[in-house]
Amino acid sequence: MSAHRAGANEGAPPALKALLDGIDVLGRLDGWLGALCLAALTLLMLAEVAVRALSDIFPWVPADIPVAWEYSSYLMAAAFTFGAAMTLRAGGHIRVTLVLARLSPQGRRWLETVLALLGVGFTGFLAMAMVNFTWRSYASDQVSISSATPLWIPQAMITFGVCLLVLQFVGRFFQALLGLPLEDLSMKAASVAE
């Protein structure tokens, strides 16, 4: 554990520090799940290309993988939501800093606190809607038309990613309120290539 990461939530009351550290751990899990979804998406698309190329050579090879496009859309949506919490904590989301750069430290802290609270509200609403949407799909046994995949499975992955983003915004709210660092630079990629 790096020194910066160990001290990212120092200064918070002990119970809150444990919560914030737990949210950071979940944020890292979020990033790894997003990376796994991207890797699976890449492998699925490469398999689709390989099967298509092989079908031109060997007539007995099917021309495509029937679920490739459907599952790739599930994986892409999951990758976006799974990567969101870690990206927020690492400071990787696109932001307009024109106003923030002109504020005093106290003004910036106040604005960051309000913006984090708004983030909790918006993503919380989205998370509740996604939980409801996923539950209804599960309760009604909805399946995909093309592959008969129960729709609650990909919906649950996306819902989980959104719920992790809500937790990250909750953590950001308390970090801004207490004047703690909002970004954990140990989560940030060291270079563009990463």
Image (cartoon, rainbow, N blue to C red):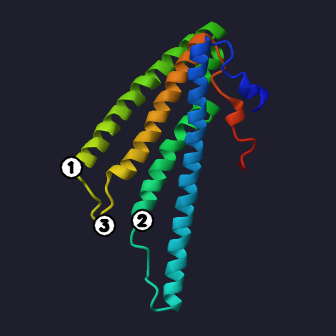
Image location of residue 22, percent across then percent down: 58, 28
Q: Amino acid at mark 2?
A: Trp
Q: Amino acid at mark 3?
A: Ser
From the image, state whether disc 2 or disc 1 is nearer to you: 1
Judge left or right: residue 91 versus residue 135: right
| Residue 77 in view, yes or no | yes
- Quick check: marks 2 and 1 in contact, CB under 8 Å? no
Dot 2 or dot 1, earlier in sequence:
2
Indicate the position of residue 17 as horizontal and vertical percent values.
61, 18
| Residue at the spot 53% in from the left edge and 15% down from the top edge | 113
The residue type indicated by label 1 comes to: Ser
Question: In front: mark 3 or mark 1?
Answer: 1
Q: Tell me where residue 87 sits by quadrant.
A: top right
Where residue 97 appears, x then y in whole percent? 61, 25
Q: Can you tell which of label 3 and label 2 is closer to the viewer?
A: 3
Circle 3 residue = 146
Residue at (77%, 31%) from the top-left corner?
2
From this view, report whether residue 23 is shown above or below residue 114. below
Kindly identify which numbered label has been placed on residue 140. 1
**Residue 69 bears which disc, if any?**
2
Name, please, the residue furthest toward the left. Answer: 140
User: Gap in Å between the C-alphas at discs 3 and 1?
Assistant: 18 Å
Q: Nearer the viewer, residue 96 or 112?
A: 112
The residue depicted at 53 percent of the width and 72 percent of the height is: 47
Q: Position of residue 190 (x, y in %)?
A: 75, 41
How many neighbours does mark 1 have within 10 angstroms: few (below 14), some (14-19), or many (20 or more)?
few
Question: Helix, strand, or loop for circle 2?
Answer: helix
- Is residue 93 something that shows in the picture? no
Question: Separation of disc 2 and disc 1 at Cα?
Answer: 24 Å
Q: Is residue 139 left or right of residue 181?
A: left
State the quadrant of the N terminus: top right
